[in-house]
Amino acid sequence: MMSLEDHQRGLLNLVKSRGVAPTDAYLRHVAASPGLAVVRDTALFWRAFQLQSQCPFTCRLLKRLGCFEALLADYFSVNSTSPYVEELSRDFLRWLLFHDNALIGAVSQFEYAALQAKADSGEVFEILWDRDPDSVLLALQNDSELPGTEENCTYRVRIDRNLSSGISCSRQRTADPSFPFRA
């Protein structure tokens, strides 16, 4: 007989679509249940809803690039998540920081830094962009076309605790045209 903890872990693994096939009869029954898909979809819906309220620019970008649902499912299948939306959002954004797409990395890092500054973190963040960040955020806000990358140009945005005067953006040209951008 399985312990309560093992049953709970087994159910969580089923909801998150991870782990090996269950050996327990009850968990095998749940795994074959059509209701499991509904539970998975509902859990992802509410997490997506929470993330969209806390990190709208990142979520809009991911939707625009057609990868929001897939990345969300990937994230929740392999990560423990907090029931608190603030922690959930920060963890999700931190997970995206080193995404292969430089724009996803920059936008997620920008929103992460803004959330940290809003929470009175003493950290100072510097985000590198391969295109004008103001134009990116405006395009995401207005659902207009995203600007393209700018050759030999890097935008450096600094964010710290004082959001009213702590955000600065400076444009810096790089000497090397093959400058490997990484947020």
Image (cartoon, rainbow, N blue to C red):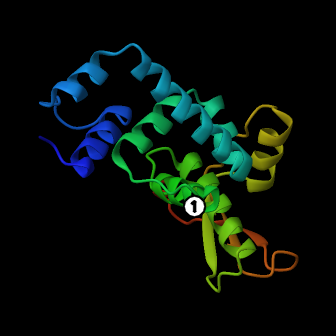
Q: What residue lies at 63% left-to-right and 31% top-to-bottom?
A: 63
In percent of width and height, residue 42 lies at 55, 29
User: Against 6, is 126 above or below?
Assistant: below
Asked whether 17 or 113 is in front, the reply is: 17
Q: What residue lies at 16% left-to-right and 25% top-to-bottom?
A: 25
Q: Quadrant of residue 167?
A: bottom right
Q: Is residue 53 visible?
A: yes
In percent of width and height, residue 88 lies at 55, 56
Asked whether 91 or 158 is in front, the reply is: 91
Q: What residue lies at 31% left-to-right and 45% top-to-bottom?
A: 8
The quarter of the rendered structure image containing the N terminus is top left
Q: Secondary structure at mark 1?
A: helix
Disc 1: which residue: 90
Q: Is residue 67 visible?
A: no
The amino acid pointed to by label 1 is Arg
Left or right, 124 with reference to 34 = right
